[in-house]
Image (spheres, grey):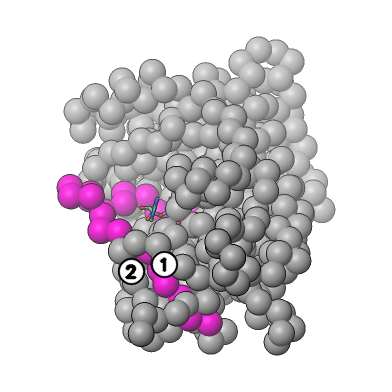
Amino acid sequence: MAQSFDICIRGAGVVGRTLALLLARERLSVALVAPPAPAGTGPDVRAYALNAASRTLLHSLRCWPDAAQATPVQRMQVAGDQGGEIAFDAADQGVEALAWIADVPALEARLHEAVRFQPLVEVVAAPVPAPLTAVCEGRASRTREEFGAAFDVTPYPHHAIATRLACEQAHGATARQWFAPDGSILAFLPLGGADGRQVAVVWSVHPQQAQELLALDDAAFAARLQQASGGALGALRTEGARAAWPLQQARARQWCGPLATGGGAAASWVLAGDAAHNVHPLTGQGLNLGLGDVQALAEVLAAREPWRSVADLRLLRRYERRRKTALLPMGLATDGLQRLFSLPQEPWQWLRNQGMRGVDRSGPLKHWMARHAMGTP
Ligand SMILES: Cc1cc2nc3c(=O)[nH]c(=O)nc-3n(C[C@H](O)[C@H](O)[C@H](O)COP(=O)(O)OP(=O)(O)OC[C@H]3O[C@@H](n4cnc5c(N)ncnc54)[C@H](O)[C@@H]3O)c2cc1C
């Protein structure tokens, strides 16, 4: 007899795998759809800034990478385009770290291993019928389209280039970010532990500039990064590949709905992670929000009355409302910052730099911003 599942998860990225493990922990049986990666797909060059809430969640699933691959951020320095500056310090906030910079391949490897040893999760090559289908296919999800969920997309005039750098000077467990007058945003995220000399780079630039930067040889590209970072970490050498992503803000209008089953038992679909929302990476929040989604979804399903099916739309709408509310402040802040720093002319330049100085001096507002970014508001 064919095996039956409570939930079919389509998409085995970090969000889909985390959801599978959370649901299995609730004794639900899961089919995780993970078609083989296309030939020639290399390891992800990115490193994610993950907040305390994401770390606790991944720790609880035994999927948190080793210390060398999850560097705690003790300080964060953000520089405006006209002398504005904000600095955050973990000690001032009374926390162990402001965030952790997790190596993406290491995190993915942990999740793969955990799924492999979880008997209630079966990895399958194609979708299978189940009362609930969770769509975790990322921003270009085909299934979201197939299910008719409207996805409102606003493209940003930015592509993000990611790579790794070896630096002459140690990063000192500090994450650094520079907003430039042309609207570009450069971030150096510390890797390799507190004394490391390697950083992960996310450089959001106009698409044309991205093409130009991607075409440079390694030495010329490193020289451009050294210039853009004002030589903050001394001489730089690129390590590993360069990859680029077009950026967009996006929101699904509906996060759940019924599925036609041809007269069988009720079935539903639900969205999570980048399939439901996309934000600019300048605040390093996309995956943190996605992990917040799957934690909330697992909690809502676990708390259901015993007679209620996981496909019950009242449950799924509860999840949708909870996550839409949680997403609002971070989505608005990220989008607002991107827009404010993309206006080249006065008085915006003056205003944003003054604003940064003001926030830097204002204890309560700065504390509030730090707590939200850390996922502990
Ligand atoms: C440059 C950059 C830097 C970032 N930095 C940060 C950061 O510092 N902190 C942070 O929190 N976030 C960051 N993000 C955001 C983060 O990358 C995303 O939010 C996160 O990857 C979303 O995870 P996901 O699992 O929802 O989607 P994805 O990572 O896109 O995974 C989706 C998975 O589904 C699979 N799939 C797609 N279609 C199908 C299908 N039809 N059937 C089956 N499987 C399918 C894909 O192959 C993939 O494995 C960054 C993003 C970018 C672009």
Magenta-drawn stretch contains 52: yes
Magenta-drawn stretch contains 73: no
**Amino acid of disc 1:** Val
Q: Secondary structure at mark 1?
A: loop
Q: Examine the image and state in which quarter residue 242 appears.
A: top left
* Residue 238 shows in this picture: yes
Asked if disc 2 and disc 1 are in contact, CB closer than 8 Å, the reply is: yes
Is residue 44 depicted above or below 218 in this figure?
A: below
Residue 317 screen position, x and y as percent: 73, 61
Residue 135 screen position, x and y as percent: 51, 57
**Foreground pick, 192 / 136:** 136
Q: Which residue is depicted at the point 77% across and 37% down?
A: 358
Segment colored magenta: 28-55
Residue at mark 2: C-beta within 8 A of ligand 1? no
Q: Which residue is depicted at the point 21% across and 33% down?
A: 218
- Mark 2 vs mark 1: in front: 1
**Amino acid of disc 2:** Val
* Circle 2 residues within 10 Å: few <14, some 14–19, many ≥20: some
Q: To which residue does mark 2 refer?
A: 124
Is residue 305 depicted above or below 291 in this figure?
A: below
* Residue 79 shows in this picture: no
Q: Examine the image and state in which quarter residue 331 appears.
A: top right
Q: To which residue does mark 1 refer?
A: 128
